[in-house]
Image (cartoon, rainbow, N blue to C red):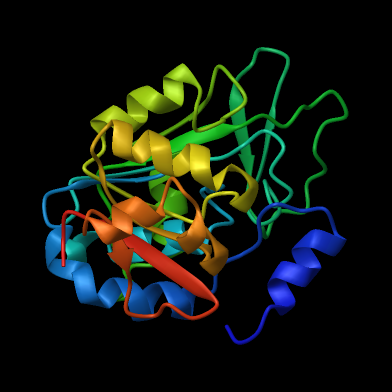
Amino acid sequence: MAGNSNLHDSAKNKRDEFYTQLSLIESELKHYRHHFKDKTVLCNCDDPYESNFFKYFAMNFNALGLKKLITTCYATSPVTGNEFDYYVDKRSQLSFLSASDNSPVQEESERKPYKVEITEVTDENEDGRIDLSDVEYLMRNKKNVMELLDGNGDFRSQECVELLKEADIVVTNPPFSLFRNYMALLMQYNKQFAIIGNQNAITYREVLPLIRDSKVWLGYNNGHFWFKVQGSR
């Protein structure tokens, strides 16, 4: 992405996150594909059915040889639930409406943050490819897990920290305003990661020493966005 247009739009709309283009994700992660084999990947700032990080790992689950993919989102995320619709009924059960459904969401419904854990992706519709329709089918048939979070989905919450502990590699676009907190948490638990941040983060006193000591470095596509990668080159 050239220029700072997305940052200006984010500030103007008072939004702390925006979509990361799938092409940007693919162009960076292709350099690390061999690091993902038999690993659990966590995307802990991503609405599972809105995030292109989720789409990348779900559609490449078998090609990368992943063990598990875990994604979670914030309760206040401005991009939550726009593509794959869901609601919580009076019995606190998670119910689903695909993007193609025309059924109205019940008036008493309430959107809440949730997590998705994927351990198997197969070509369920037998169209010769793996795509999100296969993942949606698996979610509906309970071969994978989709369930509500107890809290608000903040990556600092205890339930999300437990997911972080389980993960081998973290890949996401964290909120820029919480970048220092996010980075500190990853370093605290000594996690390998590839995350996107504002280039100004290079100058943060919490980040610059990590780059100086080769604990963190810029990714291959470090222009408007840059990746920080620990534990793999």
Q: Residue at x 46, y 49 (%)?
A: 205
Q: Looking at the image, can residue 24 be seen?
A: yes
Report whether 25 appears left or right of 18: left
Q: Nearer the viewer, residue 26 or 85?
A: 26
Report whether 101 appears left or right of 171: right
Q: Nearer the viewer, residue 107 or 49?
A: 49
Report whether 218 appears left or right of 175: left
Residue 42 higher or lower than 173, as above or below: above
Q: Position of residue 86 (x, y in %)?
A: 66, 39
Q: Residue at x 41, y 72 (%)?
A: 25
Q: Residue at x 53, y 50 (%)?
A: 174
Q: Residue at x 60, y 87 (%)?
A: 2
- Numbered marks: total: 0
Snapshot quadrant of residue 164: top left
Q: Nearer the viewer, residue 80 or 62?
A: 80
Report whether 66 appears left or right of 26: left
Residue 24 higher or lower than 142, as above or below: below
In which quadrant will I find the C terminus? Answer: bottom left
Q: Looking at the image, can residue 44 be seen?
A: no
Q: Position of residue 1 (x, y in %)?
A: 57, 83
Kindly give the residue lying farthest to the top in the view shown: 91
Q: Position of residue 84 (x, y in %)?
A: 62, 51
